[in-house]
Image (tube, rainbow, N blue to C red):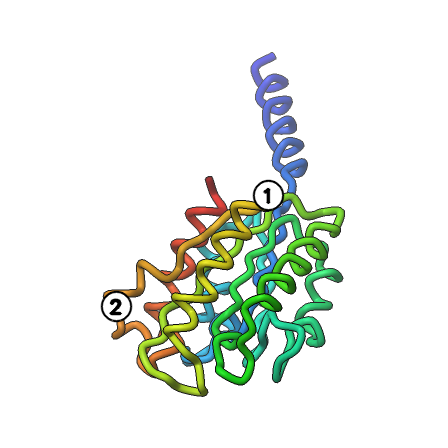
Amino acid sequence: MKLKLTLSSLALMLFLSACKKETKVACLGDSITEGAGVAIQSTHAYPSILAKILGQNYTVLNCGRSGATLLKKSDLPIWNCNEFSNVFAFKPNTIVIKLGTNDSKDFNWNAPNFSQDFQKMLDTLSSISTVNKIFVCLPLPAFKREWSINDSTIHAGVIPIIKKLERNNYVHLIDLNTPFLDKPELLPDGIHPNEKGAALMAEIIAKEISK
């Protein structure tokens, strides 16, 4: 009798384990998401570390493209990149958006267009039937004016717009800016996080996803 109960309990545990749903997470972004600044992108870019932190019930897809912007009128709109199409093919449950750094370049920046295009991005991604959560990230600080990236525009333009959009949409805000303000050593070139910086990003994002 005890053996039958044990076997039944084991079978139930295996059944429940098999029924656990996998959560798919798509990380949409620029070179910081792609992994520029780390030695091995496949293991040390923040989405790869995020996957390890979240565990076996999550699958994380890196949809980062170096140089990408959220703005449709720019030098490299994410809208035209394969990485954006990959989000739809992946059919994620959760999407993490970390864009805005390249939008701050003087020849790209346009505040009204950024606000309009970001809203279009949220509307477009929300249309994916499998999506139930969208996280929008505040960009990392830029400690150097490299590649025309402008920290003043990030703080005075990009961040306020993202905060306003978060308030007006059913999305979740992740502050990746404040935790890095006193940690310039984690961004050796002034823009891209090293392995420790990517790990900190992953920890912050994982904490929000797991809530």
The residue lying furthest to the top in this view is 1
- List x then y, in percent, for residue 106: 49, 82
Question: Residue at point 59% right, 66% down?
Answer: 112
Crowd class of label 1 (few under 14; some 14 to 19; many from 20; radius 10 Å) = some
User: Could you tell which of marks 2 and 1 lies nearer the N-terminus?
Assistant: 1
Question: Residue at point 53% right, 67% down?
Answer: 99
Is disc 1 placed on a helix, strand or loop? loop
Three-letter residue code for mark 2: Lys
Three-letter residue code for mark 1: Tyr
Q: Which mark is residue 170?
A: 1
State which quadrant residue 75 falls in. Answer: bottom right
- Compute the Cα span from label 2 to label 1: 31 Å
Q: Nearer the viewer, residue 28 or 72?
A: 72
Question: Residue at point 36% right, 70% down?
Answer: 141
State which quadrant residue 88 falls in. Answer: bottom right
- List x then y, in percent, for residue 163: 47, 53
